[in-house]
Every structure is written in C-alpha cells, then in structure tokens.
Image (tube, rainbow, N blue to C red):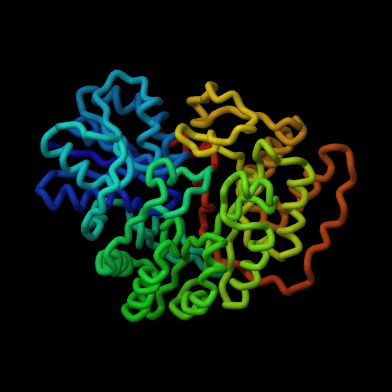
Amino acid sequence: MRVLLLSTYDLGHQPFALASAAARLRGEGIPVTCNDVAVDDLNEEAVAGADLIAIHLAMHTATRLSLELLPRLVALNSDATYVFFGLYAPMARELITEDITAHFIGGEIEDELLGLAKTGNPPANDIHLSKLLLETPDRTDLPALDEYARLQKSEGNDVVTGYTEATRGCKHVCRHCPVVPVYGGKFFPIPVETVLADIDQQVEAGARHISFGDPDFFNGPSHGLRVVREMRNRHPHLTYDVIIKVEHLLKHRNRLPELKQTGCLFITTAVESVDDRTLTLLDKGHTRAAFIEAVSLVRASGLTLSPTFIPFTPWTTLDDYRDLLSVIRDLDLIENVSPIQLAIRLLIPLGSRLLELEDLPLTPEVFDRDALSYTWANPDLAVDELANTIQGIVDHGESAGDSRSAIFTQIWQTAHEIDGTDAPALLMTERPKMFVPRMSEPWYCCAEPSREQLARV
C-alpha cells in the first residue's frame, strides 16, 4: 500500500508527526511520501498514486486548511482511503462531507496508522491512548529546516531551528485546551534516547536551536531535565525553548536555573487571562498573582518569558481588556508578547470541556463548521467590535513589519478610545530595551488561517 502523509500547517516547524509516522511505516517496509504543503506545493502525483492519504490535523489552523484542501485531494484521487490523525481528528468525523472512505485517529497514532496501512481494517476507536515505543522520526523527505520558522536570537541574527517532543499529551484538563478531549489528563514520555537521536539528526541538518513542543515540558520535570542535560553534553552550544504552565513555573522554581544552565533561552506559558474569574472558568490552575510571581521567578533565573493569551472570551469586558494591556505594560512584557496574542478569540470546538459551563452565553446546537467552533457573542457588542478591530491592527502591523511596541501602542489607543474615552498615556518603563528572543513565526495554534495560508491550499 502506498501512503501519503500530508501536513498543512504545524505551527511553523517541520512536522514531527509526519516524521514519526513515516519512521513507523517505513520500518515495516511500507512506501511513504511526506508532503508538507505549508512549505512545498501539493505533490499531485503522490496524491493521485496513493492508496492511503493520511492528513495531520495538528490543531485549529491545520484543520481549517485541511478542510479547504480536501476537495482538491478528492478530485485528484477519490478512490484512496483517507485517514485524519492528530488532536482535531476525532472531531473531524462530524465535519467531512465528501463521499470518501475516511477514518479518524487521535492520541498515539503510529501503530493504528501501521495497522490500517497493512490490513486496510479501520481502527476500532477514534482515540488511542496505549503507550507506544516510538522510533526516531524519519525526516528524510521533508523540506529542509531552514525553510521553517527560525529563532530570532538578536536583531538581524536568525538561527536555523529544529523541533521535537519529549512527551505527548498533558496531565492537566484546562477547559479550553484541545489536548484534553483526546488525552483526558494522560501524558506519555518519549524515551530519552529517541528524543536525543532526533535532536542529533536535526543538529547534523543545521539546527542551532531546538523548540520542544510538549504541551507542558514539566509534566514530567525529571524526564525533561534528563533530556536537556544530555543534549547539553552532546551539543554544548545548542539552545532551546520549552512550554511550561504557570503553576509548574512556581511549583518547580528550583529547577529554573538548570534550564538556564542547559541552554534554555525562553519559556512559553499559556496565561490566557489576568482576570481571576476567567481563569477559574477556564480551569487554568493559576491566578493573576501567580502569573505575576512567575514573571519575577523566570527573570530572576535569567530566562525570558513569552506569555500567550486568549483575551476575547464571552466574559471579557472593555475594562478587562484594558487591564490586560496595563498588566503587560507594568510587567515590561510588551516586547515579550506576540501581537497576535492580543487578538485571539476563544474557540469552543466539538468535545470541549467549556460546554460543561452552565452560564456559557452561546447556543450549543449552533456549531459553525467553517470556524470549527460553537458560536458565541459577547454581551457587550463593543467588545466584539474591538476584537475585530484589533485583529485588523495586528494583521496590518505584522504585514508592514512594525515593531511589537508600535503595534501595542496602536492597540492601547484603540482599546481606550473605542467607547469615546481618551486614551491615557502609555508610560512605558524606563528600563533599557533588550531584544527578546522569539520565533520568526508567531505561535498561531488558536488563530485563524491567514489569507496567504488559505491561498496555498
């Protein structure tokens, strides 16, 4: 059986899921072609010749793009078996309207893909949570690392960046998180030697920085530290970044200096809100005060914090949004926050734990297939108007190459003037400005696809 593994978008990095699945299939002698249309053109010859077309639905953006691409795939090959795999795959069963043979695999997917490729028999369930002995990802026919997002280490200094994962899943059950409907609070460590072998091959391919994509690198802190200690021994000049929850930054504060010592440059943390009521509704496990403390702890360790937010929710008021901007300013985080993080609107996908909330202001039976979210409107129409305006400011500012400070200043003025009030002076801190390390492509996991992305598919 000839297999095509297809990715439409994987947060700007070379798709680990395709490489991991390719290793498992090729190890059993199954011919595989990988096609990442986030970078390359669609391989129409491979589509037409495939018996099995497996499409990775990494998160929201990838699913939107994959659904846009699907009619084109079916026009090229309607006889193939289609399989959708990844975090959004279980919900995709409700979204496919094309007349095709389709299967859906969420969770630990490699063995299920192999079984399907070998026998043609459909998986017994949509979600699979048996721990797998994963092989070193096979990245041989994926685009080169320098075609993906790079670390911007300093002004004008871009560094080729690799990507890997030390764990999969997450032991936390935040209500809004797309990991939760699939993993339900479970996570699986990937063997240390497998992770290191993947890092080794990416360093050989030119990587000078590694992004760890674990939903929380400190789900298993001892495991994660074993990985980065040995990585440091093998590659002393390699830097890296990780994702860690606010509560884990506080709980494992004594481990932060070792992250610095082993080459960590920055930590991404999903703050989501600085309003304690909203944080409780999202079941985030931290408070506003905890976030502020985490900022101090990370800085004291010599690390950079890159917070992410979901500023527009059904509960957001104009004062809430202005307060968020003030906190970012007061904590001197303007350069640390990608502008898109100030425009994100809460998504409520199929199976979301948010549907458990009794006072959620939406009509549960109204699911917007195009948006992949249940519809909701803020009780204050001015907040929804502001959200749309901020999205436009961010799109224009980033397209124009404006600085984060310049975009933030425009957002600040707009947020205060939208209801006819005068914007107070921004009063940024007098601290000397240092370049904040960041990726050349912002973290878009919950953002809508751009016009450029849609045009590619």
Quarter occupied by residue 212: bottom left
Q: Nearer the viewer, residue 239 or 219?
A: 219
Q: Position of residue 299 (x, y in %)?
A: 62, 73
Q: Is residue 297 left or right of residue 64?
A: right
Q: Nearer the viewer, residue 331 or 291?
A: 291
Q: Quick one: which residue is furthest to the top in this view? A: 99
Residue 179 in sight from this viewpoint: yes
Residue name at image x 14 percent, y 32 percent? 120
Residue name at image x 35 percent, y 71 percent? 227
Q: Is residue 321 left or right of residue 241?
A: right
Residue 414 in sight from this viewpoint: no
Quarter occupied by residue 114: top left
Q: On screen, 186 above or below 355?
A: below
Q: Position of residue 1 (x, y in %)?
A: 12, 36
Q: For the image shown, how many numbered marks are present on the structure? A: 0
Q: Nearer the viewer, residue 131 or 73?
A: 131
Q: On screen, 358 above or below 269?
A: above
Q: On screen, 455 above or below 38?
A: above
Residue name at image x 51 percent, y 59 percent? 439
Q: Position of residue 128 (x, y in %)?
A: 28, 43
